[in-house]
Amino acid sequence: MHNYSSGRDKTSPGHGHDMASNPHPSTIWANQHSIRHLLFGNSEIPAASLSSFITLSMLVAVPLYDRYFVPFMHKKTGNPRGITLLQRLGIGFLIQILAIAIAYAVEVKRMHVIKVHQITSPEEVVPMSIFNLLPQYVLLGVADVFNAIGLLEFFYDQSPEEMQSLGTTFFTSGIGVGNFLNSFLVTVVDKMTGRNGGKSWIGKNVNNSHLDYYYGFLLILSALNMGAFVLASKKYVYKVESSDEIKEGSCVQMEGKVLDLSPLSLQV
């Protein structure tokens, strides 16, 4: 059995990207996992080391996406990218919501174990396998393949020609705003739920808090954000290629279709 225990210090969230309005899953896990030391046999493993699985899953998922997913979807849709930019972002959002749901389920299970073993001190070990925590990190890495990379491509591809160099700036600005809003959300929830002597959802003692309520709250926010994204996507019109670019090539690729403009394709 691999156990994990709680620490005393509450950490601030980190690593927020994608849309600023969508809480990044690794942020919502910061208060659950970064304050713990994971026990693997007789060795003590920092909880922050689990975030390496985000990078590892991305390294595995990116080549699989390009090598298999894009060609497969290209045959189905005729889109050179396999799916549209907004569809790629939407899939990323759905995977993130799934990761949040798993984090919520793990926390509910953890709270049940705490109740059964009557654990109250932040120093006491919670007898749960550390591998309960891995799925959400792996899913986050997969979501970033769709969401983070897709968002960067969206900013660059859909920006006006004279502003394409600012696409990366838009992306990194979104990361900064997202980090700020995530930190602000954690602070507000902590203050609001802990006022008047109440039990904070994100207390210093995670063995006597209600992180499950917090995850449920973020699950609802993420679902609402997904709904807003779908509504905006339906009204979005992709950028049309300029007339100069059309003249330069015989084939123009647009989002969702390819226009063949070669003279041989014109029948008189």
Image (spheres, rainbow, N blue to C red):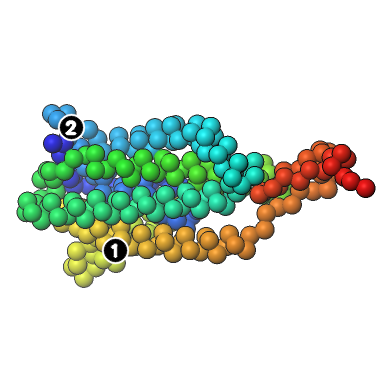
Residue 152 in view: no
Check disc 2 and report the residue beneath it.
40
Horizontal side of residue 247 vs 171, given as left or right:
right
Looking at this view, is 196 or 78 the one in front?
Answer: 78
Check disc 1 and report the residue beneath it.
191
Q: Residue at x 41, y 50 (%)?
A: 96
Residue 216 in view: yes
Looking at this view, is 136 or 208 the one in front?
Answer: 136
Horizontal side of residue 251 vs 235, given as left or right:
right
Mark 1, other Cα within 10 Å: few <14 / some 14–19 / many ≥20: some
Element marked by disc 2: strand
Mark 1 is on which residue type?
A: Lys
Mark 2 is on which residue type?
A: Phe
Mark nearer the N terminus (1 vs 2): 2
Element marked by disc 1: helix
Q: Residue at x 65, y 44 (%)?
A: 78
Where residue 103 appears, as percent x and y from the top left, is: 29, 51
